[in-house]
Image (cartoon, rainbow, N blue to C red):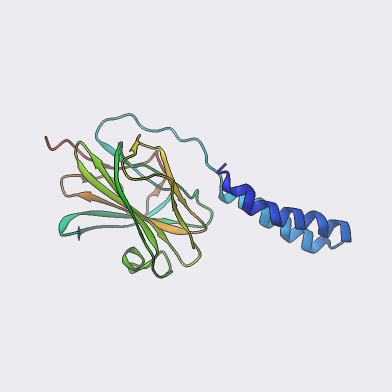
Amino acid sequence: MVKDAYGFAAPPLVLAVLCLGFGWYWAAGVLMFLGLFVFYFFRDPHRNIPTEPNIVVSPADGHVIEIVDEEFESTMGHRITIFLAVWDVHVQRAPVAGKIAKVVYKPGRFYAAMRKAASEKNEQNVIYMDTPRGRLVFKQIAGAIARRVICWKRKGEEVAQGEHVGMIRFGSRVDVWLPMEAQVVAQRGQKVKGGESVLAKWNSTS
């Protein structure tokens, strides 16, 4: 459980108890449901991180909705987009081991996360990771419901593959950009788990 859950769940649960005291059972039921849903949303289940070398794991739970070749900052590569429904786990994990080169916050719009425009125009954190094989970039992108993208890591920090890096609150998407030499093995429509499902194989360029 992510500790932020308690701050969000406490108000509706306290109000539910007060409503019970006044005999407002329908209101108490609604508030109790909201409080319990918050706990469900902020869950952080254990994941079995793969140990095979040269793999890239999914940074997020959800479904792969797009796999395309496109440029990022004038370099061609593969973009893998994962859509997170409101019932998916919303904690993000490092797709590879490496160093956080920088984290760039970009304010923006709140288009539906399924739309392609969300990748460039929505509020997002762009996380650059340097590894022995090169640079990987992934984005925490807000959606129509999500209004907060949170990164727990800072520039210069070393992270292990599958380590927690942040969270998006209440529905969203995550984009992963890999250089062309990486071999994408995930498929469109595939259900993936953060820190566990393999998205690509990325061999050393040295």
Viewport quadrant of the N terminus: top right
| Above or below 102: residue 123 | below
Q: Residue at x 66, y 52 (%)?
A: 9
Left or right of 5: which side holds 169?
left
Q: Is residue 114 above or below residue 150?
A: below
Check the picture and name the quadrant holding the C terminus. top left
Specify the quadrant of the image occupied by residue 107.
Answer: bottom left
Q: How many marks?
A: 0
Whole-percent x, y for residue 126 in the image: 33, 55
Please, which residue is most extreme toward the top here? 51
Q: Is residue 105 above or below residue 90?
A: below
At horizontal 19% and vertical 59% (from top left) the residue drawn is 73
Residue at the far left in the pictured view: 206
User: Quick check: can you spot residue 37?
Assistant: no
Residue depicted at x 33% and y 63%: 119
Q: Is residue 139 visible?
A: yes
Q: Residue at x 20, y 36 (%)?
A: 132
* 172 to the left or right of 106: right
Q: Position of residue 47 (x, y in %)?
A: 46, 35
Q: Position of residue 30 (x, y in %)?
A: 73, 61
- Which of these two is toward me, 5 or 190? 5
